[in-house]
């Protein structure tokens, strides 16, 4: 898919963030490993095409500035059924297994999907960091071990109540209860200015986290007349619960490794509950002059986040009141949109949309005795113009305005301790950011695409470190602190002239500029510059029956600067094979990814005139093998449906 990169559990569009994924035009919102697991569970033979929508129309929520990826399924036949079972083995530092089963059934007026998925195993993430204090550098090595135990299920049922109307129900559930969910071990060497080790710090953490979420959806769609009028409605309910018990201990040693004393011991007990209810209506109403669509959505969210921090250095837990909180947050959003499209003639097409969202928020910190309210009305216009010069050349222009709202946990003012000198704190006064996107696109013979793009993000927010050179503490807090300009050009070319070789190739030249508005007491320098990115994805068919395929993928990113960070260059080479066995009833795929372990990149930042570097090594270099057994009517495909409150679910941060 042009412009889409996969790096470990992170999927993004080059030069952008906050990526959204759709299935058959309906938005889902998962992140990290959950998103990777979901996409990996989709059989490639079921996919008809993948759309990249960099400027979504007004029909979709205005949340997210990086556009949408729309995975479109092949359509199914009635009176058929299918069952697909797959087992995936993943090996990096440690092994991980995933077992999935997907059953689809479509007969007469009834369509059914029932799927179950379970994962068990472990993930290792290593980090290497240096902090250059005036008294001497600190060299930190850290290892996180994640225990992956997850069970998820999905049930979708659609029934044709008449020739023109369909009613349906969907449930999606997920349960995770590993013990422990994460263990952390880090060692810090503290040097003096003569580059001699003065002392050592050993930090250990252990957490047990239980979390679950449930999503319920009721939907109804009806065809009003033969002129194309369609009405669809969705009722959605989402609940998320997370219980976390985390312990962190820090011990001090001499430079020879002799134990000195326990200097820090913290216990963090937290519970987060989120409930969301939403209702949505969409209407397609073609007119003689143009095609009209309009609709509305109302969403109601309540979040409760209770956090208690205890000092356990003496052996008896002592509540730290100022670092704890019982935070309550409510957010209500009402949105309406209208969209019109028109084909003026054989060469010109246009589309104009307007979405208006009214939002009311209220955050109550019971410990700080503080209430923060926000009430804002925003308009999000979209514009699309296309010109077909001839059969080979097509030009288009689009503009859209987007919003990025904080995740719910980012608003909680309570502290989370990583070590004795490293902690994170939320910000109940955090505001959303707004982005304006413009694109000019030239398409030549459908396989050569040139894109010029520009975007500006206002009130951008994120974590920023307040580093104290005297106490050697790092205090991370979420703030609105930047305006970001992003611009560049991309080229995408598809080669498919040979029956045995298909190649997708892209190059990007991206520039960025950041203006900072950081609170007093923090000194930081924006990192501005250019980035080059290139990729090639090649699929080879190795036999005449087209049952054996090989894939070679490679991408390269130059060193670049962005926001507060400098990044080193990085690149990745992947090799994979796929075998269709016994008339496609059995499939075996296997691959080696990031063969040379060159995808991790080093980041450098300067805050309060202190240089800091970090390099993270996730499980990018790995071997994966999947065995799939498919039986039943192989042609069955049941249309997918997703939930109407996906934005609110995504901001839960699960």
Image (tube, rainbow, N blue to C red):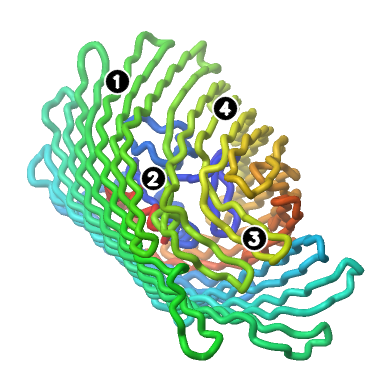
* Residue carrying label 2: 22
Q: At 44% from the left edge and 66% from the top edge, which residue is drawn?
A: 628
Q: Quadrant of the C terminus?
A: bottom left
Q: How many marks?
A: 4
Image quadrant where residue 335 sits: top left
Residue in front for this viewpoint, 428 or 568:
428
Structural distance between the alpha carbons of marks 4 and 1: 24 Å
Structural distance between the alpha carbons of marks 3 and 2: 25 Å
Q: Residue 28 location in percent, x, y?
A: 36, 50
N-terminal-most mark, 1 or 2: 2
* Residue carrying label 4: 454
* Residue carrying label 1: 340
The mark closer to the camera, 4 or 1, is 4
Residue 587 visible, this angle? yes
Relative horizontal placement of residue 598, taking residue 318 as reference (left or right): right
N-terminal-most mark, 1 or 3: 1
Dot 1 alpha-carbon crowd within 10 angstroms: few under 14, some 14 to 19, many 20 or more: many
Q: Residue furthest front?
A: 369
N-terminal-most mark, 4 or 1: 1
Q: In the figure, 217 relative to 259: above or below? A: above
Q: At 41% from the left edge and 33% from the top edge, which residue is drawn?
A: 56
């Amino acid at each position: 898919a042009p412009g889409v990169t996969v790096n470990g559990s992170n999927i993004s569009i080059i030069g952008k963030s906050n990526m959204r994924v759709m299935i058959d035009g309906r938005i889902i919102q998962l992140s990290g490993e959950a998103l990777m697991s979901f996409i990996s569970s989709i059989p490639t033979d079921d996919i008809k095409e993948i759309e990249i929508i960099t400027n979504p129309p007004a029909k979709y929520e205005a949340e997210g500035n990086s556009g949408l990826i729309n995975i479109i399924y092949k359509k199914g036949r009635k009176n058929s059924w299918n069952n697909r079972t797959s087992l995936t083995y993943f090996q990096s530092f440690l092994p991980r297994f995933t077992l999935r089963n997907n059953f689809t059934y479509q007969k007469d007026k009834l369509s059914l999907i029932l799927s179950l998925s379970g994962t068990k195993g472990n993930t290792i993430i290593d980090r290497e960091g240096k902090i250059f204090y005036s008294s001497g550098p600190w060299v930190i090595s850290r290892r996180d071990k994640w225990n992956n135990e997850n069970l998820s299920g999905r049930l979708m049922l659609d029934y044709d109540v008449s020739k023109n109307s369909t009613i349906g129900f969907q449930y999606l559930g997920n349960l995770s209860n590993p013990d422990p969910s994460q263990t952390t071990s880090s060692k810090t060497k503290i040097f003096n200015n003569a580059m001699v080790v003065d002392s050592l710090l050993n930090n250990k953490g252990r957490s047990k986290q239980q979390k679950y979420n449930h999503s319920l959806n009721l939907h109804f769609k009806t065809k009003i007349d033969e002129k194309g009028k369609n009405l669809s409605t969705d009722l959605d309910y989402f609940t998320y619960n997370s219980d976390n018990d985390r312990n962190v201990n820090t011990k001090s040693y001499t430079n020879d490794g002799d134990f000195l004393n326990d200097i820090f011991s913290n216990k963090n007990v937290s519970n987060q509950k989120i409930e969301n209810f939403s209702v949505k209506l969409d209407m397609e109403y073609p007119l003689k002059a143009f095609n009209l669509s309009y609709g509305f959505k109302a969403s109601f969210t309540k979040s409760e986040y209770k956090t208690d921090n205890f000092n356990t250095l003496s052996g008896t837990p002592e509540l730290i009141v100022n670092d704890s909180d019982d935070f309550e947050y409510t957010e209500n959003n009402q949105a309406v949109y209208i969209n019109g499209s028109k084909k003026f003639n054989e060469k010109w097409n246009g589309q104009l949309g307007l979405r208006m969202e009214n939002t009311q928020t209220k955050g109550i910190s019971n410990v700080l005795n503080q209430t923060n309210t926000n009430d804002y009305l925003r308009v999000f216009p979209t514009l699309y113009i296309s010109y077909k010069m001839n059969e080979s050349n097509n030009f288009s222009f689009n503009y859209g305005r987007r919003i990025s709202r904080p995740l719910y946990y980012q608003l909680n003012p309570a502290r989370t301790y990583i070590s004795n000198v490293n902690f994170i704190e939320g910000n109940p006064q955090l505001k959303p950011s707004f982005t304006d996107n413009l694109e000019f696109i030239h398409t030549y013979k459908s396989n050569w695409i040139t894109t010029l793009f520009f975007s500006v993000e206002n009130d951008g927010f994120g974590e920023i470190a307040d580093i104290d050179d005297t106490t050697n503490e790092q205090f991370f807090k979420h703030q609105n602190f930047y305006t970001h300009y992003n611009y560049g050009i991309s080229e995408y070319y598809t080669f498919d002239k040979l029956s045995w070789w298909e190649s997708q190739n892209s190059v990007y030249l991206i520039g960025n500029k950041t203006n900072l508005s950081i609170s007093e007491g923090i000194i930081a320098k924006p990192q501005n510059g250019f980035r080059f990115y290139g990729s090639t994805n090649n699929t080879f068919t190795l036999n005449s029956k087209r049952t054996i395929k090989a894939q070679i993928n490679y991408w390269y990113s130059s060193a670049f600067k962005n926001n507060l960070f400098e990044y080193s260059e990085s690149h990745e080479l992947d090799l994979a094979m796929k075998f269709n066995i016994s008339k496609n009833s059995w499939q075996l795929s296997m691959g080696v990814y990031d063969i040379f372990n060159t995808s991790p990149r080093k980041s450098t930042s300067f805050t309060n005139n202190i240089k800091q570097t970090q390099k993270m090594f996730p499980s990018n270099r790995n071997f994966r093998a999947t065995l799939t057994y498919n039986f039943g009517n192989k042609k069955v495909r049941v249309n997918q449906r997703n939930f109407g409150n996906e934005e609110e679910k995504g901001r839960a941060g699960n």
